[in-house]
Image (spheres, rainbow, N blue to C red):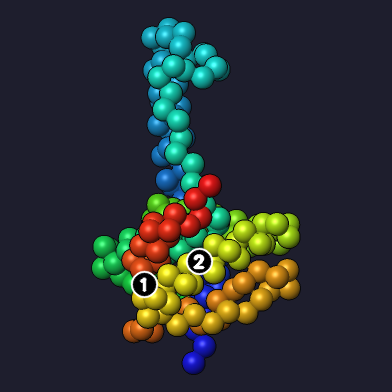
């Protein structure tokens, strides 16, 4: 039996999430309304700091995730699934199919949209697809080394991993599962952490 790699599974299931715009639009509208309200309140008080365009001494640096997109996709997929679980749902049917019977439940649609927004999985999936097409030979080599190290660690935990090579020479899993036949994010995260894989 051949198991799809996680980003392939996500690619099959998740692109339709971008069509669930009403919930995302409402969240964005709320955020914009809050920003406009804050800007109006600051302008009304005459606070000159609001007009400053330079960085503030109080600015906290944003924690950037510099891991390759594929590793971030594993993490996002696990968080997405956990988010759905916490709401009493799982991945039901083909999320790319607008006729998916699960979409008849508006609460399920809300849960999928909310979890997709919170985990940023749609953007990460799109980034994976975009970056794979633009990788240099050196970047392919770096990703292959990271994948080979991850594979060694996971195989030591009883995983079955079989690979194929893409048209650009990138190692890709054809079979990627633990001894129970599932994708266990905990094992993946532990291997990444133990070996500092994907860190710059």
Can residue 32 be seen at all in this image of the molecule?
A: yes
**Residue 181 image point, x, y percent:** 38, 84
**Gap between marks 1 and 2 measured at Cα:** 17 Å
Element marked by disc 2: helix
In front: mark 1 or mark 2?
Answer: 2
Element marked by disc 1: loop
**Residue 170 image point, x, y percent:** 66, 69
| Above or below: residue 125 compared with residue 10 | above
| Residue 149 disc label | 2
In the displayed structure, does residue 19 sit left or right of residue 86?
A: right
Residue sitting at 47 percent across and 72 percent down? 152
| Above or below: residue 39 compared with residue 17 | above
According to the picture, the residue beneath numbered tag 1 turns out to be 184
Can residue 22 be seen at all in this image of the molecule?
A: no
| Residue 196 disc label | none
Q: Tell which circle, 1 or 2, labels the residue nearer the N-terminal end.
A: 2
Residue sitting at 39 percent across and 57 percent down? 193
């Amino acid at each position: 039996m051949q198991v799809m790699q996680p980003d392939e599974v996500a690619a099959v299931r998740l692109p339709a999430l971008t069509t669930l715009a009403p919930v995302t639009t409402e969240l964005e509208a709320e955020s914009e309304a809050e920003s406009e309200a804050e800007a109006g309140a600051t302008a009304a008080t005459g606070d000159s700091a609001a007009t400053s365009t330079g960085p503030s001494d109080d600015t906290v640096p944003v924690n950037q995730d510099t891991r390759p997109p594929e590793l971030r996709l594993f993490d996002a997929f696990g968080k997405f699934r956990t988010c759905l679980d916490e709401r009493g749902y799982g991945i039901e049917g083909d999320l790319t199919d607008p006729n998916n019977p699960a979409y008849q439940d508006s609460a399920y649609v809300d849960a999928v949209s909310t979890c997709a927004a919170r985990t940023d999985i749609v953007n990460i999936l799109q980034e994976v697809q975009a970056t794979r097409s633009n990788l240099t030979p050196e970047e392919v080599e770096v990703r292959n080394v990271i994948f080979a190290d991850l594979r060694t660690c996971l195989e030591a935990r009883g995983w079955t991993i079989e690979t194929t090579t893409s048209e650009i020479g990138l190692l890709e899993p054809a079979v990627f599962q633990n001894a129970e036949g599932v994708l266990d994010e905990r094992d993946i995260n532990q291997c990444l952490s133990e070996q500092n894989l994907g860190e710059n």
